[in-house]
Structures are given as C-alpha cells and as structure tokens.
Image (cartoon, rainbow, N blue to C red):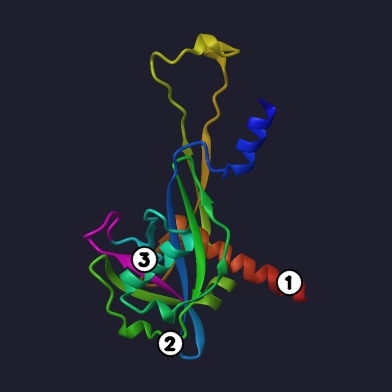
Amino acid sequence: MIEKIRDMMADHQPDAITKQSKYAVLLPLVRVNEAIHILYEVRSHRVSQPGETSFPGGALETGETFEEAALRETEEELVLDRGKITVLGEMDYIVKQNHIIKCFVGWLPEVDADRLEPNEEVEAVFTIPLDYFLTTEPKYYETRLKMERDADFPVELISGGQKYKWRNVTQQIPFYRLSDHYLWGYTAHLTHRFSELIKNEANKAD
C-alpha cells in the first residue's frame, strides 16, 4: 500500500483543496513623454463592477496557464497585438478562499495609450506615472467579516461546543486618491506591492 501511495504522490500536482476560480492580470508599463507609466482600465457597463479601475485580465480558459490568460485578456481588451507585450516577470499574487489572482508585469514600449481603442469591456484607459506610486503610499482601511454558521451546524462535535471561539476575518483594503480616478482593492494592492518591490530593490543597491 505504501508503494502505491508513493507512486500516487510522485505523480500528483499539488493544488488548493478548495475549488478556487483562477484569474490572471497584466500590470502594463508604457512610456509617456519618456517617463514610465502604469496603464489602467475603467470597466464599462457591459461587465461586472462597471466604472471601477482595473488591470487587463480575467478568468483562465481551459488549458491556459496564468501567463497565457493575462496576455490573451490584454490583447482582447486593449485590442493590440500580443507581440507588442514583453512579459518582464510574475510578481506576488492574491489568494482568497474562493479565488486566486496572479499578476504579470508587462512592458509595452510601442503602445501609445492615447491611441488605444479598447473593446466594449473597457470604458476608457488612463496612465499614472510610476514615480507617483514610488513616492505615494496608499491609505489602508479595515473591514471585518463575521463568521456565521447554519442552524444545524454540529457544534456538539467540536471541542468547546457553543463556546468555541470562531475567528472573524479582518481585511486591510488600500485606497489611492488620484486626481481624476480612484484606485482601491485588488488593483491597488497589486500596484502597491509592485512599488514596494521596486523600492526594496533600490534599497539593496544602496
């Protein structure tokens, strides 16, 4: 039996136990007047969360890798050739109980943001200088999620029963106050983390 288990584990590809939806986004870097900017999308009324700021991205299709999904979604949403995107690498990602979001940093040196004509999922695009995020910290606000259980939940099978101390979840949600747009949630988290990676690397050089 142990040999069968050994063979099974040797071939097994680890994955999350919970069934998580998988998403991928691209953090696009473009050149504006010789400065590096981050490009953002404003979601249109044709998709969920209309009016919100996001990166190009979406759910993985069958057989896709996270990187392939990020590139496909960027190509579709910004209506540009995939050959104009150079993936610089994958950065830290977001994991929640029901979904995982991976983020790739892309360099689009030939793309003029003002001339982009995105598809119907995108209301507009805009850019913010990377330097802004290297010198500006977001403000984090706290939210709390309270654990609730069904009436027939078998508390008698748990040590402590009714007195069991369920852990409530506290989340820190970042906001950037931009002049013409707002940036919060996952997109702000990824933006902030990207700026931290750059600053950490600069500190190493010093």
Q: Is residue 38 above or below residue 109?
A: above
Q: Amino acid at mark 2?
A: Glu
Side (left or right) of 125 relative to 158: left
Q: Is residue 150 above or below residue 70?
A: above
In primary-sequence order, the first of circles 1 and 3 is: 3
The answer to whether the residue labelled 1 contacts the one labelled 2, judged by CB atoms less than 8 Å apart, is no
State how far apart marks 1 and 2 are (Cα). Answer: 30 Å
Pick the front one: 158 or 199: 158
Q: Amino acid at mark 3?
A: Glu
Q: Which of the image's four quarters has the N terminus?
A: top right
Residue 18: x %, y % from top left: 48, 37
Confirm whether the magenta stretch covers residue 137: no
Side (left or right) of 173 relative to 135: left
State how far apart marks 3 and 2 are (Cα). Answer: 18 Å
Q: Look at 43% across and 87% down and name the residue there.
A: 110
Q: Which of the image's four quarters has the C terminus?
A: bottom right
Provide the residue designation for mark 3.
Answer: 73
| Secondary structure found at label 3 | helix
Provide the residue designation for mark 1.
Answer: 203
Confirm whether the magenta stretch covers residue 45: yes
Q: Look at 32% across and 69% down and name the residue there.
A: 77
Q: Amino acid at mark 1?
A: Asn
Provide the residue designation for mark 2.
Answer: 110
